[in-house]
Amino acid sequence: MMRSGHAGSYLYWSERRVAEVASDNGIKLDGQPNWTLKAALQGIGVEVGNGNRGDLTRREKAGKIEKHIGAQAASALDKPPPARFAKGAGQIHIARFLGGPERDKGAMFHIRTTSSAGQHIDLVLFGSMDNFPGRILRPADAPEAGWFSSAWHAVAELLESRGTRNTSQWDDPEQLSVEALNIALNQGSTGTEEEHEDRPWTRGYTLAHTDDSEWFTQIYTDVLLTESRWHLSGNMLGAQRIIVGAPVWIRTASPTSLIRYARLPDRPAGGTRRRRLPFLR
């Protein structure tokens, strides 16, 4: 993880979620007062400019939130579910997600990590393409091709209700979490898993991945899979805990951390061909 003060840039920043997290947790994100020097008969005095507060930078806002919530978020993955926030660092895979609350500009993120006890944890996060500063990634960079899950409406309901409502056929938290992970790992496939193994850019809807990146996320659902219930295989093998939520921000160490798939060979051709992703039990 990047140490405080080290150079970096925000690949993803949700101003709305930053404001909501701050408001919900009593964190003041007001700017600093502008101090001005003013001559007086008794000498030089200091005056605070009313209403002229400088805006906080993204880094300053993030610092205030992490100071208030940071310890809770940092330890979330080492404690039993449920967690409200989590943070960490590492590799993040980025793709499009169609049909959710953001409709044609939805973004999806997958992070695979392990707890200090060795538990495998998958985070599936949903956000908006509008939150990439400078529009560094665009919807047009991800061809609409390959497998597409019909469970998008169930995931959309989960996101819109922030994990409080589920009226779909995937009617319990474990089912829906497994389906969300299935979308993150298999959406856009056009052949066997072996054909796409370690080459996510060969699937449709995929955008990029980034290494050495810090992330801070808000959590909607957090489940431990019942081992006797699930017989997962392929790239879902070993999944134990699945967290579904929304990224608040993602910060990269350098511009070279981001690998854009639009620039790589073996990209699938455009043209929508939506078929149901297999639901793995």
Image: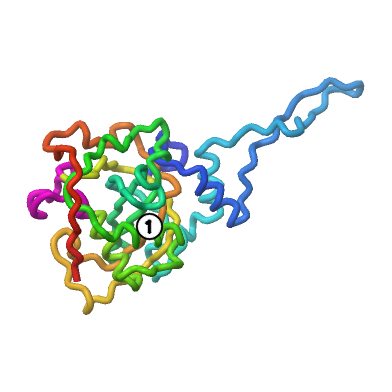
- Decide: is 141 above or below 278: above
Q: Quadrant of the C terminus?
A: bottom left
Q: Hey, which quadrant is residue 268 in on the image?
A: top left
Q: Hey, which quadrant is residue 24 in on the image?
A: bottom right
**Left or right of residue 151: residue 9:** right
Residue 151 seen anywhere in this rendered image of the structure: yes
The answer to which of 153 and 222 lies nearer the viewer is 153
**Left or right of residue 134: residue 238:** left
Residue at 29% across, 52% down: 110
Magenta extent = 185-202
Residue at 18% across, 44% down: 145
**Left or right of residue 196: residue 165:** right
Residue carrying label 1 = 156
- Asked if residue 186 is among those painted magenta in the image, a careful observer would answer yes
- Decide: is 179 above or below 134: below
Colour logic: rainbow
Q: Hey, which quadrant is residue 164 in on the image?
A: bottom left
Total count of labels: 1
- Picture coordinates of residue 91, whole percent (x, y): 28, 47
Residue 118 seen anywhere in this rendered image of the structure: no
- Picture coordinates of residue 29, whole percent (x, y): 61, 44
The answer to which of 250 and 129 lies nearer the viewer is 129
Q: Amino acid at mark 1?
A: Ala
Residue at 28% across, 61% down: 151
Give the residue at the far right of this rendering.
41
- Picture coordinates of residue 11, whole percent (x, y): 38, 38
Which element carries disc 1, helix, strand or loop?
Answer: helix
- Decide: is 158 above or below 58: below
- Asked if residue 54 is among those painted magenta in the image, a careful observer would answer no
